[in-house]
Amino acid sequence: MAYNREGYAPWSLTRKAGVQSATVDGTIEVPQYIQPVLDTGFVDEKGDWKGTKSSDEQFHSFDTHVGIPNGGTMLTPQSTSDDFWTLDMTGFKDLFLAIKPTNGGNYAINAVMGPDTNSFANLRPVNPNALLRGHDNTTSATLHDLISDGAESCTADVWNIFSIQSTLRDQKLLQFRIVNNSGGEADVDFAFMRLVG
């Protein structure tokens, strides 16, 4: 059984008409079957290979902030254990944020610009620890704080996992500023997982 069909190439019909000086074969084979294709990336305009991003399979960073007093602030991620000093969302759409405090209560969670020792693409310096502002397809046409939650209730000694969808998509230099408003001192663990979406 033949799987390919022969068709005329549009650029060389003269060859089929009998002109033997044509430099291109006058037929092309057209596949007549379904074949799976795997997309693993592309070559950019500079000729560099860019692999396709895939979702993180596990949580990363696992920062531990010890002895954060009530009203105390921490910036995260800042772990170098798996090369995450800031969170790079380039190519990612969604994010899971996980917080495990030793003292239950309210924690303020804000998305902020990373440190000025790092660059945002090729721009440096940035305004470190500034609330990230933008437009996330809400009904408002004005720029606003992207993530600014003043009182998120967290349970002690378990992972409190929050889903952030699309709002921080492709942000290149991201940290979270977390404020302990639980009423007492706490050790706070942090981790994240990025999703292509």
Image: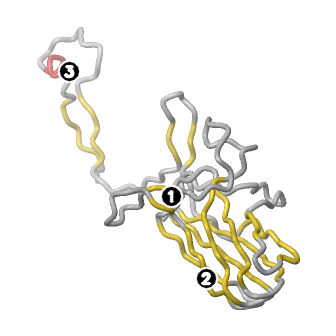
- Place residue 185 in its image quadrant: bottom right
**88 over 107 or under it: above or below:** above
* CA distance separating discs 3 and 2: 68 Å
* CA distance separating discs 3 and 1: 47 Å
Would residue 161 be found to the left or right of residue 31 on screen?
A: right
Tell me which residue sits at (73%, 64%) in the image.
76
* CA distance separating discs 2 and 1: 22 Å
Tell me which label, 3 or 2, sits earlier in the chain: 3
Would residue 20 be found to the left or right of residue 100 on screen?
A: left
Q: In this view of the protein, which residue sits in the foreground, 18 or 116?
A: 116
Tell me which label, 3 or 1, sits earlier in the chain: 3
The amino acid marked with disc number 1 is Arg
Secondary element at image label 3? loop
Secondary element at image label 2? strand
Q: Position of residue 109 (x, y in %)?
A: 63, 72
Tell me which residue sits at (50%, 34%) in the image.
44
Residue beneath label 2, please?
152
Tell me which residue sits at (41%, 61%) in the image.
136
Tell me which label, 2 or 1, sits earlier in the chain: 2
Tell me which residue sits at (56%, 57%) in the image.
132
Residue at the right extreme, as displayed: 67
Residue beneath label 3, please?
12
Q: Where is residue 149 in the image (x, y as percent from the top left)?
A: 57, 74
Q: Where is residue 158 in the image (x, y as percent from the top left)?
A: 73, 88
Residue beneath label 1, please?
169
Figure quadrant of the N terminus? bottom left
Q: In this view of the protein, which residue sits in the foreground, 32 or 132?
A: 132
- Place residue 87 in its image quadrant: bottom right
Q: In this view of the protein, which residue sits in the foreground, 40 or 162?
A: 162
Secondary element at image label 1? loop
* Circle 3 residues within 10 Å: few <14, some 14–19, many ≥20: some
